[in-house]
């Protein structure tokens, strides 16, 4: 099977992506993605700590604007 090349322009830059399928492949792309995602999820779970770390809180809260809201 011939490789498939796709060109996409994003912000004035040309990105070329080449995809090639193996004629001896035994799993579908859907099954492979599912396997990789499940493996990634289990890997990230093993790195998470049991106790969440506390985060420093700021007195100034900004939400969606440049204006400041001060907690009272």
Image (cartoon, helix red, strand yellow):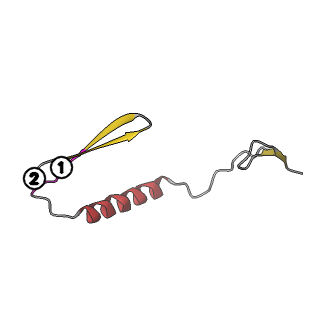
Q: Residues within 10 Å of mark 2 (few under 14, many from 20)?
A: few
Along the line of sight, which residue is nearer the eye, 26 or 23? Answer: 23
Is residue 31 shown left or right of residue 53? left
Name the residue tied to disc 1.
Answer: 20
The secondary structure making up most of the magenta span is loop
Is residue 50 shown left or right of residue 19? right
Along the line of sight, which residue is nearer the eye, 1 or 27? Answer: 1
In the rendered structure, are the residues bearing label 2 and label 1 in contact, judged by CB atoms less than 8 Å apart?
yes
Residue extent of the magenta highlight: 18-23
Disc 2 is placed on an element classified as loop
Name the residue located 75 percent from the left edge and 41 percent from the top edge. Answer: 66
Residue 64 placement (x, y as % from top left): 70, 49
Disc 1 is placed on an element classified as loop
- Which residue ends up furthest to the top in the rendered image? 13
Say above or below: 12 vs 7: above
Name the residue located 13 percent from the left edge and 54 percent from the top edge. Answer: 22
Q: Total number of numbered labels?
A: 2
Gap between marks 2 and 1 measured at Cα? 8 Å
Quarter holding residue 23: bottom left
Is residue 34 shown left or right of residue 72? left
Along the line of sight, which residue is nearer the eye, 34 or 53? Answer: 34
Name the residue tied to disc 2.
Answer: 1
Along the line of sight, which residue is nearer the eye, 53 or 17? Answer: 17
Q: Is residue 21 magenta?
A: yes
- Which residue ends up furthest to the right in the rendered image? 72
Label number found at residue 12: none
Residue 21 placement (x, y as % from top left): 16, 53
Quarter holding residue 32: bottom left
């Amino acid at each position: 099977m011939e490789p498939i090349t796709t060109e996409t322009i994003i912000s004035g830059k040309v990105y070329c992506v080449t995809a090639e399928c193996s004629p001896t492949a035994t799993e579908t792309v859907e099954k492979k993605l599912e396997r990789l995602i499940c493996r990634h999820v289990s890997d990230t779970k093993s790195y998470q700590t049991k106790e969440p770390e506390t985060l420093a809180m700021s007195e100034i809260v900004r939400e969606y604007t440049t204006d400041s809201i001060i907690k009272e």
